Amino acid sequence: MRVLENFVGGAWSRASGATHLEVKNPATGESLAEVPLSTAADVDAAVKAAQAAFPGWSATPPVQRARYLFKLREIFDAHRDEIAAICTAEHGKTLAEARNDFGRGIENVEHAAGIPALLMGQGLEDVASRIDCHTIRQPLGVFAAITPFNFPPMVPLWFLPYAIATGNTFVLKPSEQVPLSQQRIFELIEQVGLPPGVVNLVHGGRDVVNAFCAHRDIAGVSFVGSSAVARHVYRSAAEAGKRVQALGGAKNFLVVMPDAERRMTVANVAESIYGCSGQRCLAGSVVVCVGDTYEAVRDGLVRHAKGIVLGDGSKPGVTMGPVISAAHRDRVLSYINQGVAEGATLLLDGRDARVDGYPDGNWVGPTVFDDVRPGMVIATEEIFGPVACLMRANDLDEAIAIANRSEYGNAASIYTSSGRAAREFQHRVGAGMVGVNIGVAAPMAFFPFGGQKGSFFGDLKAHGPTAIDFYTERKIVITRWF
Ligand code: NAD
């Protein structure tokens, strides 16, 4: 069995911890590798390597740092299919979804390659008589990132390119459930010839996370994952004096107005809910139908869901893969059971889904709940699986009120042909990312990414201009010449 290694100080090395986890293909159940659960000593070694690299790297002119990113972009571009195949094998999503996953990651490398322009400060002559003022941005030191299982190539690339483009050095802990695409991505990064220690990879689980949060030589931590852990990371890393951005879980509401374009809307709602088997932080979960639109949306959604082809994401024709693990399948199934117990009507039941020839896959079929009411567990908690909850509202005000009751605030969408309704919705809904006739409102690399309320802890969101703020200290210089 292949045992994964950490990448520390420009070389691959075995983790010091003796414990390993099996990485499995969630469609076939096949063992792919063993991932080490690294220890605080492994984290310390990576941080020391990153610290040693910092003086030289931060003094490297931004134009030269950008050239490494140009090279990285070309190498990544040449390996799109290979990384997508690895992602599908470890995660289960379809190859098309995996290609988009890596593609969105590469766009962050492209954006960060513009670092000479992004890093500029501001200046003003004569802030007082014959006195000038300007700002410069400086890197802070070593940054760490902790990432979730659901976008294995992309989410680490929300952080790594900006951290190093701004002159910091970097340590990544990918999800222990899907470490293989990052393993390969770091092999590709190795080909770029960055100075040793600028980027480091430490595999593991919660011990690595807690060691990051406590380490006195880490300047800042980025986290993406569930809200419970996001809250923990935000508290403990801030307590240790670090910058923190912690992106948490989600419960996303899709509001369909009576004037929405029906056919496109239903197809888009279905893609939002069932794409990536519902394992997206931007996935639609509760569909709130306003006025007389309910029956048409319900029937259309069930029709779409029945047309989904469940199976091994690496096979042509498959449109929805498994969920990540047997434990996660059980969690999703227990939510479906709970929905039934709470009195919602199950229109389409994915609990007994099977795929011929794949007895060991973690299958959950597309599921649709009718008659869901505010306050039910399935309407409030994050399920993170292919489950749609349908609700009614009399008007837009009621629909917004339903969405705003949620303790989460990652994303929300409205489907309408009314500019007035769309404007009202974007203004009042309590979510960080808003879609208008778009069910997965995923900001591209040059915009910030992040939610509100229980979906985000911190102030500076991922990528876009806020990444440059997160990774730099602004220094203000006031000048007078006698
Ligand atoms: P998770 O919280 O279980 O794990 C995320 C990371 O935290 C992993 O690297 C894991 O090793 C670590 N971790 C897990 N438990 C820990 C603990 N007790 N202490 C310290 N570290 C711990 O999340 P997941 O299941 O990998 O990912 C799915 C979640 O991520 C969903 O809630 C989803 O909404 C969220 N997510 C959010 C965004 C966003 O932009 N807000 C993006 C992607 C995923």
Image: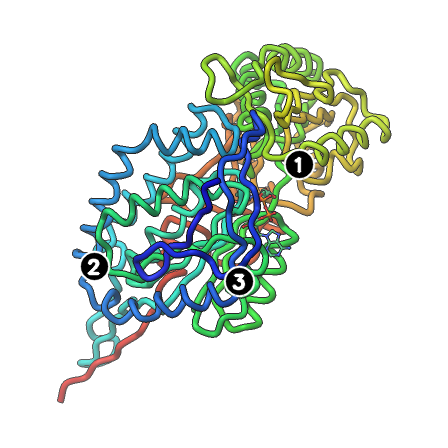
User: The C terminus appears in which quarter of the rendering?
Assistant: bottom left
Residue occupied by mark 2: 62
Residue occupied by mark 1: 328
Q: x, y percentage for residue 301?
A: 63, 16
Sequence-earlier tag: 2 or 1: 2
Residue occupied by mark 3: 39
Give the spatial CA distance, label 3 vs label 2. Answer: 34 Å
Mark 3–mark 2 CB contact (< 8 Å): no
Q: Is residue 161 left or right of residue 222?
A: left
Q: x, y percentage for residue 435?
A: 51, 33
Q: Is residue 402 left or right of residue 342?
A: left
Residue 207 vertical placement versus 346 (above, below): below
Element on which disc 1 rests: helix
Q: Residue, x 34% and y 47% (percent of image)?
A: 186
Q: x, y percentage for residue 332?
A: 70, 32
Mark 1 surroundings within 10 Å by alpha-carbon count, few (fewer than 14), some (14 through 19), many (20 or more): some
Q: Residue, x 70% and y 17% (percent of image)?
A: 294
Mark 2 surroundings within 10 Å by alpha-carbon count, few (fewer than 14), some (14 through 19), many (20 or more): many
Query: Which amino acid lies under the numbered mark 3 shown in the image of this protein?
Result: Thr
Query: Which amino acid lies under the numbered mark 2 shown in the image of this protein?
Result: Pro
Sequence-earlier tag: 3 or 2: 3
For the residue pair 230 and 56, the one nearer the viewer reads as 56
Give the spatial CA distance, label 1 vs label 3. Answer: 25 Å
Sequence-earlier tag: 1 or 3: 3
Q: Is residue 467 visible?
A: no
- As drawn, the label of residue 371 is none
Q: Is mark 1 within 8 Å of ligand 1?
A: yes
For the residue pair 369 and 298, the one nearer the viewer reads as 369
Residue 21 vertical placement versus 385 (above, below): below
Query: Which amino acid lies under the numbered mark 1 shown in the image of this protein?
Result: His
Mark 1–mark 3 CB contact (< 8 Å): no
